[in-house]
Image (spheres, rainbow, N blue to C red):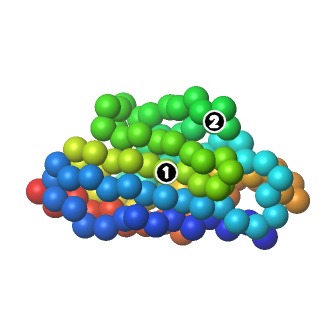
Amino acid sequence: QVQLVESGGGLVQAGGSLRLSCVASGIIFSINDMGWYRQPPGKQRELVARITKGGITEYADAVKGRFTISRDNVKKTVYLQMNSLKPEDTGLYYCMASILGVGLKDYWGQGTQVTVSS
């Protein structure tokens, strides 16, 4: 059984910073892409950033220049450093990982809330 556990969310004022972490555990032979998605209130889930096993990154236009995704393959952990936060960054942030365990499957964390006040 594979689990993804996020941490680091919270309440912050506009202009502030937060760092999210997500660690994978369980029967894991390899982790391919990892990423962060968010679901703003009343909206669909959307991609924030993702990173390949080799470190190639992709960002949503809305977060480019403010957010940085990184990963530690030994620790099976992905991070999201969020700077210059805006109220529109508010939402439930989910970690995703494409994991080769018993089979190859995309796994999701339970989500961590990020709230940015104006």
Give the residue at the far right of this rendering. Answer: 102
User: Mark 2 falls on what kind of element?
Assistant: loop
Relative to 9, does residue 56 appear above or below in the rendering? above
Q: For mark 1, what is the residue? A: 79
> Is residue 87 in view?
no
Asked whether 27 or 94 is in front, the reply is: 27
**Label 1 vs 2, first from the N-terminus:** 2
- The local crowd at label 2, few if under 14, some if 14 to 19, many if 20 or more residues have their Cα within 10 Å, is some
Image point (73%, 48%), residue name: 31
x and y, in percent, of residue 52 in the image: 63, 36
> Which three-letter amino acid code belongs to the residue tagged 2?
Thr
**Which of label 1 and label 2 is nearer to you?**
1
Q: Which mark is residue 12?
A: none
Image point (22%, 62%), residue name: 12
In which quadrant of the rendered view does residue 32 lie?
top right
Distance in Å between CA atoms under marks 1 and 2: 13 Å
Residue 74 shown left or right of residue 14 in the figure: right
Asked whether 38 or 112 is in front, the reply is: 112
> Which three-letter amino acid code belongs to the residue tagged 1?
Tyr
> Is residue 11 in view?
yes
Residue 89 shown left or right of residue 108 in the figure: left
Image point (22%, 44%), residue name: 84
User: Mark 1 falls on what kind of element?
Assistant: strand
Q: For mark 2, what is the residue? A: 52
In which quadrant of the rendered view does residue 93 lie?
bottom left
Q: Quadrant of the N terminus?
A: bottom right
x and y, in percent, of residue 99 in the image: 75, 52
